[in-house]
Amino acid sequence: MSQVSTQSAAPQAGAPIDAEVVIIGAGPCGLFQVFELGLLGIGAHLVDSLAHPGGQCTELYPQKPIYDIPALPVCGAQELIDRLLEQIKPFHPQFHLGQEVTELSRRADGRFDLRTAAGTHFNAGTVVLAAGVGSFQPRRIGLEGAEAFEGDAIHYRVREAAAFAGKDIVVFGGGDSALDWTLELLERAKSLTLVHRRAEFRAAPASVAKMREAVAAGRMRCYEAVPHALSSSAQRLSGVTVKRPDGALETLAAEQVLVFFGLHPKLGPIAEWGLELEKRALKVDTEKFQTNVPGVFAVGDINTYPGKKKLILSGFHEAALAAFAIQHHLYPQKRQFLQYTTTSPIMHQRLGVPD
């Protein structure tokens, strides 16, 4: 599938980049925000601290299957990003990747100054925060000597499932990522053991049921335990010792260890911009998805409101309504009406649909 060019624009010295909208965060909600704005004839710049678009979908679980995207019975996380990039091609978004926005301030004329750590400066009419949980780092296993094996034998994300074929694998965690990869790698592994600190799991009940069926059939093992120590031979990981609730220790064969203890969400500079927060999320209304600062909007996991559900499809809905609010904020005198992509000649023109 061909993709929109995501080459990062070089930081500009001198005059700021004039932008209708700057979207902070190039995950699925940020990308879909480009689409909804594009349908209204509004261009966007995207800034992301990662070196590539996709957010958590690309960074943490690119091959994870997603089942709740409308009209796609199953879609890989990276596949979803690729499809979104293809969808926004007609609108020519400009990407500024590998850059963190460090400053946001309101100008006297009501527009916004944004600056990145790389030196890029924007003069933006509006700002959309689509930064997910903010900048994030996975919670590490915390065992002596673990850092030496990170990226080789200890992993906090999976990029290529094929790399684990024929290996003794130990998976730590009890959430969706841990269960999803346990089930995904089960057929590939030489042996597979799932370790969780509790008997109860946070993952989807259907995934837990499949895992327990595999354990009952002798295809894998599951332990209630916590990591205790690593074993190595000739500078290669050979095992991991776990500690059971009764204090008993057991060493498990492990050539590859996957750790899914969740993320350390950090809002970073966003927390210093005068935006109203509730439990480390940005409060928005449900009409415009605007923050307490007029002209600054938030969509996706970074926002909160009564009834909020942290789902990608919820973020898509938020982006659609935010786009109309952004249009009104930028062009309050412009008559606003809903047009349908199936029949509107203007929409067809913007999408590049042949006559």
Image (spheres, rainbow, N blue to C red):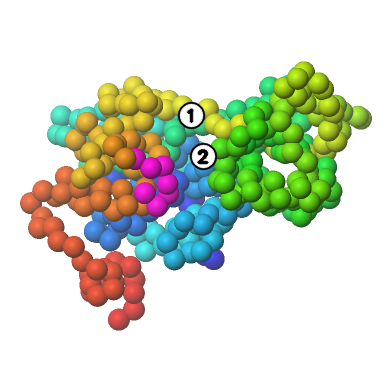
Quarter of the image containing the C terminus? bottom left
Residue furthest bottom in the image: 355
- Which residue, given by chain and number where applicable, does mark 2 sit on? 50
Q: Is residue 126 left or right of residue 308?
A: left
The part of the chain drawn in magenta is 308-314
The answer to whether residue 328 is visible is: yes
Q: Nearer the viewer, residue 255 or 190?
A: 190
Quarter of the image containing the N terminus? bottom right
* Residue 178: x %, y % from top left: 64, 41
- Which residue, given by chain and number where applicable, does mark 1 sit on? 265
Q: Amino acid at mark 2?
A: Leu
Q: Is residue 355 left or right of residue 329?
A: right
Answer with the quarter of the image where residue 240 lies. top right
- Report helix, strand or loop for mark 2: loop
The stretch drawn in magenta includes residue 321: no
* Residue 190: x %, y % from top left: 84, 48
Answer with the quarter of the image where residue 344 lies. bottom left
Q: Amino acid at mark 1?
A: Pro
What residue is shown at x 24% (from left), y 59% (from top)? 41
